[in-house]
Image (cartoon, grey):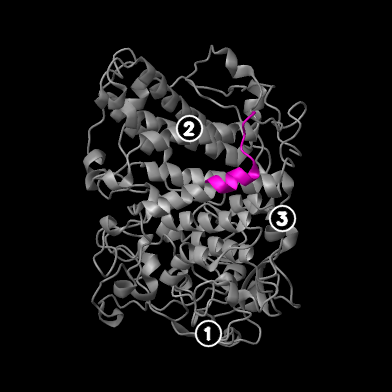
Amino acid sequence: MKNINFNIKRIGLVAMVSAFMFTGCSDYLEQEPLDSVTEAVYFKTPEQFDAAANFFYRATFGYVAGSNGGDESSDLSANITEQPTYASGNKPVPTSDGIWSSNYNQLREANQLIEKAAEYEGDQSEIEVPVATAHFFRAWNHYKLLLRFGGVPIVTRSLDVSSEELYGPRNSRYEVIYQILSDLDVAIDGLPSENSIGDTEKGKLSSEAAKSLKARISLYAATYEKYVGTATDGDGTTVGAGSAKPADYPSVQQLFEDAKQSALEVMNSGAYELWDHRAELGDRNLFYLFTLEDGSNPAGLTKADNREFIIQTVYDFTLRQIGQNISHSKPYTPSRKLMDMYLCEDGLPVQYSSVFEGYDTMTSEFQNRDNRLTSFVWEPLKEYWGYGANVDGGGAQYGVDFADAGTGFDYRYVPQLLNPSGGRGVGYQGVKFVTEHKLRETRSESFNFPHLRYAEVLLTYAEATVELGGGVISDGDLDISINKIRERSDVAPLTNALISPYSDLTMLGEIRRERAIELFGESQRFDDLKRWGIAEGELNHDLILNYVDGTEFETALNPKNPTDLIYNPAGFSYGTTSTEKSISTYAGIANVKPGALIFDIKGNRNFSIKNYIDPIPSDQIRLNPELLQNPLW
């Protein structure tokens, strides 16, 4: 295999340990940074290997936000806070790129630990876990580079500025995937089972975590090759990274089988379970999962009650706050498309459900719906807590009625339909990852962030199974996978009999719908659309909001300012839809009808096959001309 090339900074161990702070539960978050040491005297004891491995968590995992990572400008989102948006396909070639630089810098640390392990004079079993952890993070860093750029230079040893290998070409995407899967196999063998990890160590990686990531990446590789093929590879001679494959690279069929089997092994392990506290939290059960910390919910549940997050960044109010503008910005507001993708209680989409109540009133579309909608989208004129001491009336006072909160604040949510106003929170208000904690001010939120959770494992199993079945999946396989997700969302199970009367509903389409709904805001949407080969068909449409023409919105007064209308048509230059139109490549997604507010026009969206992988930063090509730019860039 061709090996590496990037603009490397020599990051010594002194820099590593001086910045040291562990990511995880309190016992290893509280450890003090190590004093200045050198490579010559470090990596001599198992404890030093453990300390070096613990550093990877903080260096690599963080809160994923923004349009490139957090789905904010996808087809499911009504937020357009930057121009051009990632979804527009109009971003220029950057001079530098944080994904490129940070992941290559982090690869050096993982490679260094693996190399030092080979020199360790003690029993190798003493350092098996930190070595396996290093292999996991080496896979993770290559995976993040793969998603962004396609084929990239593979780095499997630590380098310095004199290394000859710095000036070679890129590896193909297939060589990168092969390396990732090889590293994950080492991690699977060396990491402990989740069931054996004690409470004080929760948040650290397990064998099941590595299997879950292997399932995700196997599915990604299989679907990308099936639906996109070599279209983004280039020839590797004049453009791109080429399509070279290792001799024993798995077939698409084998990758699907590996994804299914890895997911099934995690499912059978008993290590994880879906968060389901509807008995205590009602139809906002899922809202509290994504803001979970001490004092964050009326049932008094804590992070110890969450067995759904598999790979996560662990935050702590005292030791490591998220430090981002999350609750104030409310980044994940749904588009019309996502609102109609949410199912009704009978398990059917809005265009076919007998219990869907339409759009005539401001609240009618919220009735008899999926709890993921009621958890993550505020219903008009319903009361909701703010957060902190006084933001939007201040945080939750559990056990106290809103009227008795003593703040004098009107907690009713009134939709913002006066103007585009910053491109966020218009029409609907999404609140995934938005706290209502009364002791959390802006940037002090400390709930954990999931990079991969058990619900995704169930979705992966279902998708791999239906792909292997040529579009067919049994009710039994649905019951052990996505029907568990639907059940905790108070949605009827997906069965072959349920969708058979509707010619435009397919099992593959419905499983993809479930994935879109369940994982919105968790950095999956863009990568899913690309690997399915449908990004252009999903992104290049008008961005649509509420139905306003002929509905209550036309005449509704703002109850907080009774002389003002809620909706101001003059504030929106694009007007409303005039004809019925499709907004998806999947016919099972409801068409948009006349009378819906247009927030942004499709003329501003030009996503194409070119955008399936990002360009190599120009400063990297300047430093090494052997790094051929991606096709069409």
Q: Earlier in the sequence, mark 1 or mark 2?
A: 2
Q: Amino acid at mark 2?
A: Asp
Q: Earlier in the sequence, mark 2 or mark 3?
A: 2
Q: Residue at x 53, y 31 (%)?
A: 101
Helix, strand or loop at label 2? It is helix
Q: Residue at x 75, y 78 (%)?
A: 578
The answer to whether residue 268 is above or below residue 353 is: above
Q: Which residue is mark 3?
A: 536
Q: Which residue is mark 1?
A: 364
Q: Amino acid at mark 1?
A: Ser
Say which mark, if any, is on residue 183.
2
Q: Is residue 68 magenta?
A: no
User: Magenta residues, as a range?
Assistant: 247-258
**Residue 552 image position (x, y, % from top left):** 57, 87
Q: Amino acid at mark 3?
A: Glu
Q: Residues within 10 Å of mark 3 (few under 14, many from 20)?
A: many
The answer to whether residue 11 is above or below residue 395 is: above
**Residue 124 image position (x, y, % from top left):** 31, 22
* Quarter the N terminus occupies: top right
Residue 79 shows up from this direction: yes
Q: Residue at x 76, y 39 (%)?
A: 632
- Spatial CA distance of label 1 from label 2 is 51 Å
* Quarter the C terminus occupies: top right
- Spatial CA distance of label 3 from label 1 is 32 Å
Closer-to-camera residue (526/187): 187
